[in-house]
């Protein structure tokens, strides 16, 4: 039997600190940085955080495919262990304390070279291979591991560790990425954290009618009840906001958008002086966080906290694994709604995540604009943004096929292109300074997806939000319009 490998110490360059701070935003640990709390408080806080089993080691002779980059799995667990009766009533989730579901799964990727960190979302209905259990939705991996451990007489913490381990193996099989650490936050913890920071401001688009989803608690409904426009949400309504999928046009994929939107808003709230410099809110925050986490034993939160610098949520990229949207399949004759993972696009997605360039693109010579047909999609939510950029591309000699909205809001303007169209993509990239090149089989032709970073076809005036284009690696101004809205 070989002895376990010594835990790897996380050495974070400047850019990587951004990502670790993003992780802490998810669980509200970022409030520790620059808060003036005594060192003894730090030590007491970290001493109270429980640890699960270590992350499975790489097989003998195997190498971490992304080298010294760090991948930290972020998991939301539906457990309500420790909830008071009042909290259970507010949560609208019943009194079953044995639930082991996990509908929120994200992977924080911290590039080793200091590049822009990314939080990757995994839709809970993604149809994948769960090692040892065959095909299933990705959110079945955690309860499969958990229930098997419980049946074997394991403790609650050991069962949760088993669920996390199987989920890690599932993500590894799907993406090829090695998970270095994990952090689990409970449903109850999310509720308490959102209460402790005084809520988060959100804005809903939509019809004049309020957004509601109250028909059947316990039957998959969230309990959301919010008006159109700006609201400050916390507790049960914050939980409902990130859990709703009924009534949203794209179901599980729209829920992912909600979760990413909420994380950005929550990060900004937690990092604000209103929380950091308020000893009462800070105390409540530490209590909420300390009672809600489970991490692997090698994730040294205190050591990481010492390295953090103040950052904004705009420096974090949010992405979702490549997929073909919602599909209906019939395994063993049973009608099942899933999200179909685009496995053909996964290698290119992971390569982009790791910051690997496209040699074919680098060697290509830009095509003549008249030979390039391009689609233009608005991923920023700014009215007529796609139309203006399409017109500017036509003025430069390009042909434009489709002008439409993207399926979701994106922070980064990208020029997507399929294999074989590198020369055409390079021509379009020359027309849009600082746009990101993305190779993917998901598109039929070169496709411009305009993001909230404000990057546009050269010569166009800044958008109405006041955002101006900036070089890669810098953050765009948030402008003066306040909180952005989401469907």
Image (cartoon, rainbow, N blue to C red):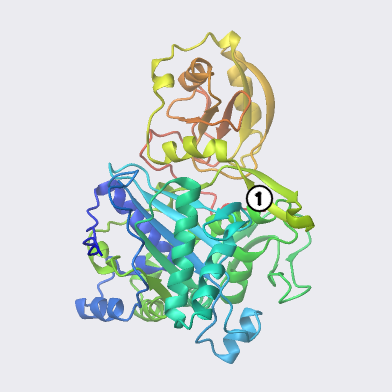
Rendered location of residue 164, percent (x, y): 46, 66
- State the image quarter where residue 483 is shown: bottom right
Residue at 39% over, 60% down: 23
Above or below, 410 against 24 in this view is: above
Residue 383 position within the rendered picture, expressed as x and y whole percent measured from the top left: 65, 38
Kindly identify which residue carries mark 1: 339
Q: Is residue 12 above or below residue 431?
A: below
Image location (x, y in percent) of residue 181: 35, 61
Q: Residue at x 29, y 76 (%)?
A: 46
Q: Nearer the viewer, residue 93 or 162?
A: 162
Q: Secondary structure at mark 1?
A: strand
Q: Residue 353 sits in which quadrant?
A: top left
Above or below 151: residue 397: above
Residue 335 visible somewhere in the drawing:
no
Left or right of 195, for residue 89: right
Give the residue drawn at x 60%, y 85%: 88
Q: Nearer the viewer, residue 62 or 296?
A: 62
Where 38 falls versus 448 (above or below)?
Answer: below
The answer to whether residue 337 of the structure is visible from this angle is yes
Which quadrant of the rendered structure holds the N terminus?
bottom left
């Amino acid at each position: 039997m070989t002895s376990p490998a010594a835990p790897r110490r996380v050495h974070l360059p400047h850019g990587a600190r951004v990502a670790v701070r993003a992780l802490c935003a998810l669980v509200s640990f970022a409030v520790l940085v620059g808060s003036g709390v005594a060192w003894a408080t730090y030590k007491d806080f970290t001493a109270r955080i429980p640890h699960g089993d270590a992350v499975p080691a790489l097989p003998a002779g195997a190498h971490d495919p992304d080298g010294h980059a760090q991948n930290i799995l972020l998991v939301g667990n539906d457990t309500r262990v420790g909830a008071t009766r009042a909290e259970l009533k507010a949560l609208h989730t019943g009194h079953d304390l044995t639930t082991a579901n996990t509908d929120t799964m994200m992977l924080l990727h911290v590039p080793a070279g200091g590049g822009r960190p990314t939080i990757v979302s995994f839709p809970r209905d993604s149809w994948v291979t769960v090692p040892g259990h065959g095909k299933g939705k990705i959110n079945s991996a955690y309860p499969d591991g958990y229930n098997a451990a419980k049946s074997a007489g394991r403790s609650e913490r050991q069962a949760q560790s088993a669920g996390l381990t199987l989920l890690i193996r599932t993500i590894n099989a799907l993406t090829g990425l090695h998970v270095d650490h994990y952090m689990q936050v409970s449903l109850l913890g999310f509720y308490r954290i959102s209460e402790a920071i005084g809520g988060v401001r959100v804005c809903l688009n939509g019809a004049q009618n309020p957004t509601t989803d109250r028909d059947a608690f316990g039957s998959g409904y969230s309990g959301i009840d919010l008006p159109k426009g700006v609201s400050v949400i916390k507790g049960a309504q914050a939980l409902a906001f990130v859990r709703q999928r009924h009534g949203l046009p794209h179901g599980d994929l729209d829920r992912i958008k909600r979760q990413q939107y909420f994380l950005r808003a929550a990060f900004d709230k937690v990092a604000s002086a209103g929380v950091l410099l308020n000893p009462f809110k800070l105390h409540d925050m530490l209590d909420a966080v300390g009672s809600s986490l489970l991490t692997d034993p090698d994730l040294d939160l205190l050591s990481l906290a010492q390295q953090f610098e103040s950052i904004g949520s705009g420096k974090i990229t949010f992405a979702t694994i490549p997929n073909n949207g919602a599909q209906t399949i019939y395994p063993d004759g049973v009608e099942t709604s899933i999200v179909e993972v685009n496995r053909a696009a996964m290698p290119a997605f992971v390569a982009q995540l790791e910051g690997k360039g496209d040699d074919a693109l680098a060697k290509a010579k830009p095509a003549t604009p008249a030979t390039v047909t391009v689609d233009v999609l608005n991923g920023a939510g700014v009215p007529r943004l796609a139309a203006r950029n399409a017109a500017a591309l036509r003025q430069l000699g390009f042909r434009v096929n489709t002008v439409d909205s993207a399926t979701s809001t994106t922070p980064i303007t990208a020029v997507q292109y399929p294999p074989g169209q590198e020369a055409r993509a390079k021509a379009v990239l020359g027309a849009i300074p600082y746009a990101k090149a993305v190779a993917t089989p998901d598109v039929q032709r070169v496709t411009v997806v305009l993001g909230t970073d404000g990057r546009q076809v050269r010569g166009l005036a800044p958008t109405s939000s006041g955002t101006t284009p900036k070089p890669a690696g810098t953050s765009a101004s948030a402008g003066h319009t306040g909180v952005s809205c989401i469907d």
